[in-house]
Image (cartoon, rainbow, N blue to C red):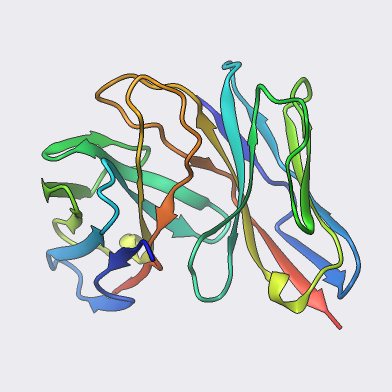
Amino acid sequence: DVKVTQSSRYLVKRTGEKVFLECVQDMDHENMFWYRQDPGLGLRLIYFSYDVKMKEKGDIPEGYSVSREKKERFSLILESASTNQTSMYLCASSSPQSGARYSYGYTFGSGTRLTVV
Amino acid sequence: AQTVTQSQPEMSVQEAETVTLSCTYDTSESDYYLFWYKQPPSRQMILVIRQEAYKQQNATENRFSVNFQKAAKSFSLKISDSQLGDAAMYFCAYRSAWFSTGTASKLTFGTGTRLQVTL
């Protein structure tokens, strides 16, 4: 069964800490994404990556960075955690066919609920 | 930029009844995909149904069907014979159908509708 695995289901961190959220997929997907989910706001894209070492900002990148050193792993980094980054973080992956129509959806991880105190 | 709007934060349906969740979207593109995702308490996002904009026929998956009105930019989800296991957050999402090398086609989500199923 194909999977996107997020390393932590729940995480509690202190304000100012550097936080790493890890995501690993076993489907050899090119694209990986980090979303943030908040009540009443839905899912908002933070960053995405379409290849190793490649990244692009999403809609709300402020306060975050990402790393993709290997195809299967995509890390979200909170450089200095703040209380307004308390949220649910969802990782996803997808496989495009470059330049062509494709109809695949995303495969999501089961989320990391981060609390910053 | 594309936007997706779900105007019903919460809906309730009795078991075995039918419920319709609304979604509207805004785009200048002519070719795109629309999705409904389900997120149960386990948090795992599950693809419920997918619609290709160039297809006029509405998609159907067992008890789930959509009413896709391209001109009106409307994409509603109908759940027939509702079951307790249908209780979840439902998200409508949009994605462009085409992209070029070096980019990734992003999903744009609505704010979600929480569906309760009662006995």
Q: Nearer the viewer, residue B119 or B60?
A: B60
Q: Residue pushed farthest bottom?
A: B119
Q: Residue at x 15, y 59 (%)?
A: A80
Residue B15's x, y, as percent?
86, 75
Q: Residue at x 39, y 22 (%)?
A: B99
Residue B48's x, y, as percent?
63, 54
- Image position of A116 (left or right of B85): left
Q: Residue at x 77, y 36 (%)?
A: B58
Q: Nearer the viewer, residue B48 or A56?
A: B48
Residue A74's x, y, as percent?
20, 53
- Image position of A47 (left or right of B58): left
Q: Where, by quadrant of the figure, is residue B84 drawn?
A: bottom right
- What is the number of callouts on the image? 0
Work out whether A76 lies above or below B40.
above
Q: Residue pushed farthest front?
A: A1
Q: Residue pushed farthest right?
A: B17
Residue A73's x, y, as percent?
18, 55
Q: Where, by quadrant of the figure, is residue A111 drawn?
A: bottom left
Work out whether B4 lies above or below A39.
above
Q: Residue at x 41, y 21 (%)?
A: A100
Q: Quadrant of the C terminus of chain B?
A: bottom right
- Image position of A56 (left or right of B66): left
- Image position of B41 (left or right of A5): right
